[in-house]
Image (cartoon, rainbow, N blue to C red):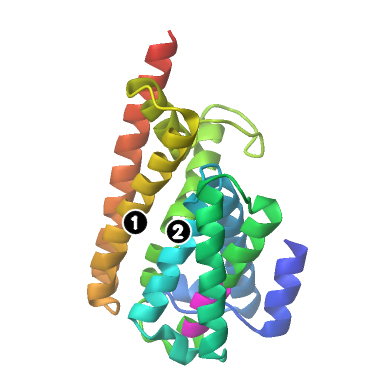
Amino acid sequence: SFILFVFLYISNLQVNDLRNDFLNSFLSNYYSGLIFTTFCFLVLINGSNFIDGLNGLMLGYYLLISIIFYQLDLINYLDVANNNIIFFSAILFILFLLNLFEKSFMGDTGAYILSFFYGYLLIKIYSEYQIFSPFFVVLLLWYPCFENLFSILKKFQLKKSPIKPDNNHLHQLIFFYLKKKYKMQNIFANNYGSLIILFYNLIIFGFGIQNITNTQFQIILLLLNLFVYCAVYFKLFAYKYKLKV
């Protein structure tokens, strides 16, 4: 938290416009905006570490965001050489394939660095150019962020510490379902679960890029995601513990 806060303070990077008068009044204070931006990065970073539980899921998710960067020509807004981004994405794709076959793993540090990198790029582009709705950024990063927030809320409801680990994240429930329902081996259930989540997000991102400036449209997609996540989660949760009983 301290490192993030200091970095954001030095780089003068923060979210300062959510296209809502009430929220913007809160963000208008420099330090309030800085604390809010630090919180957003913490949620993203920890959530990305959560979803790294299946082969290729975290790497594949940020590969999808890389595709969005190219699709919308967002690279042109970055002070980064185009060849460097291409090289970086190629390395990411190789790591994704190696991760699918359990030949390479990102670990905590890899998840932290990768999520921070993409969060930084998206917020920087928005804060400097505002060529899309801020909720388009939220849409692109919704899955790891909501995975983290949902886990915290769930543990509070169960009167458990929010930092206590568990094995009931959505991707873990999907893995359990595929393994038990279809008698899949671990590696196949692992990879299929990852690809199912990535395919869903690819569809959502495809809808999202159709109207990146429309905040209401982006919010509707976000609400749809939350509904689908919760519906699938509770169904798979019931399946897992009914099966165990």
Number of disc labels? 2
Q: Position of residue 219 (x, y in %)?
A: 30, 63
Residue drawn at 34 percent across, 39 percent down: 230
Q: Which residues are magenta?
A: 118-125
Left or right side of 187 for 196? left
Residue drawn at 56 percent across, 92 percent down: 79
Above or below, 171 relative to 176: below
Badge 2 element: helix
Question: In the rendered image, which quarter contains the C terminus?
Answer: top left
Residue drawn at 48 percent across, 84 percent down: 125
Give the quadrant of residue 20: bottom left
Give the quadrant of residue 205: bottom left
Left or right side of 225 for 66? right
- Residue tagged 2: 61
Left or right side of 28 for 227? left
- Residue tagged 1: 201
Residue type at mark 1 is Asn
